[in-house]
Amino acid sequence: MEAIVRARAAQQWPARIAAVISNKPDAKGLEFAKAHGIPTAVVDHKAFASREAFDAALQQAIDGYQPDLVVLAGFMRILTCGFVAHYAGRMLNIHPSLLPLFPGLHTHRQALAAGVAEHGATVHFVTAELDHGPGVLQARIPVLPGDTEDSLAERLLAEEHVIYPQAVRLFVEDRLSIVDGEVRIAETTSF
Ligand code: NHR
């Protein structure tokens, strides 16, 4: 989230960061957002009896800011079908694996256990099926001898901070479309 906020400012995207919203009242990103003059909100999932009730409250909070795009950044609650449908084609996530490899949790552990030579991260549109939406951009890193979950996570995070802002920028520039369930990236037109 911080990388996206910083890239927007540094590259002067024609976009606003409408709000930073967390389900965790103590999320560090909320302090960062406040310090940067970005509106914040908390929708604590623990206050709701069901996923549907939480998602309805979250949707109401988001839509109050009228964003064009919803960006999941470290968001860890599985979203219901209705919520996902409401933001179809306008919600992105970054998942720390080279999807379709290793959906779900503990991806660095999964990569090490599988013995892959290469690991990575994938920015994808969010669909109802977890970590299965159309991919926008991927970053790749080699798995090195002696790598641990922590060392992989740290090296990959640096790459995630590059491709996630790039993907959001492509959306802001209106260059992303989904055709037959696959993302197409339009070239920039030069005159
Ligand atoms: N929701 C849908 N419908 N589809 C996706 O692709 C989603 C999603 C919600 C979150 C992020 C994803 C990731 O990047 C994401 C993608 C959390 C879980 C999970 O198991 C899985 C995938 C992702 C995020 N969450 C547990 C749950 O019961 C809670 C785990 C925890 O709190 O630590 O919601 O990896």
Image (cartoon, rainbow, N blue to C red):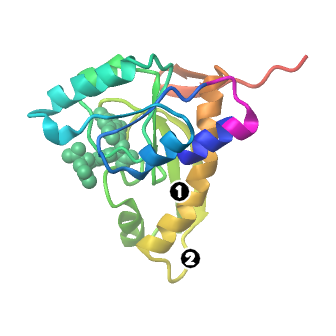
Q: Residue at x 11, y 33 (%)?
A: 50
Question: Is tag 2's residue or tag 1's residue first in the polypeptide sequence?
Answer: 1
Q: Which residue is mark 1?
A: 120
Nearer-the-camera pick, 5 or 156: 5
Q: Residue at x 45, y 16 (%)?
A: 66
Nearer-the-camera pick, 44 or 80: 44
Q: Is residue 109 above or below residue 48?
A: below
Q: Secondary structure at mark 1?
A: strand
Find out whether residue 172 is within the magenta segment. no
Residue type indicated by callout 1: Gly
Q: Residue at x 20, y 31 (%)?
A: 54
Label 2 crowding class (10 Å Cα cut-off): few <14, some 14-19, many 20+?
Answer: few
Q: Residue 123 location in percent, x, y?
A: 51, 41
Q: Residue 79 location in percent, x, y?
A: 27, 33
Q: Is residue 32 above or below residue 114?
A: above
Q: Residue 17 location in percent, x, y?
A: 55, 29
Q: Which residues are magenta?
A: 9-15
Find out whether residue 13 is within the magenta segment. yes
Which of the 4 quarters of the picture holds residue 91? top left
Residue type indicated by callout 2: Leu
Q: Which residue is mark 2?
A: 144
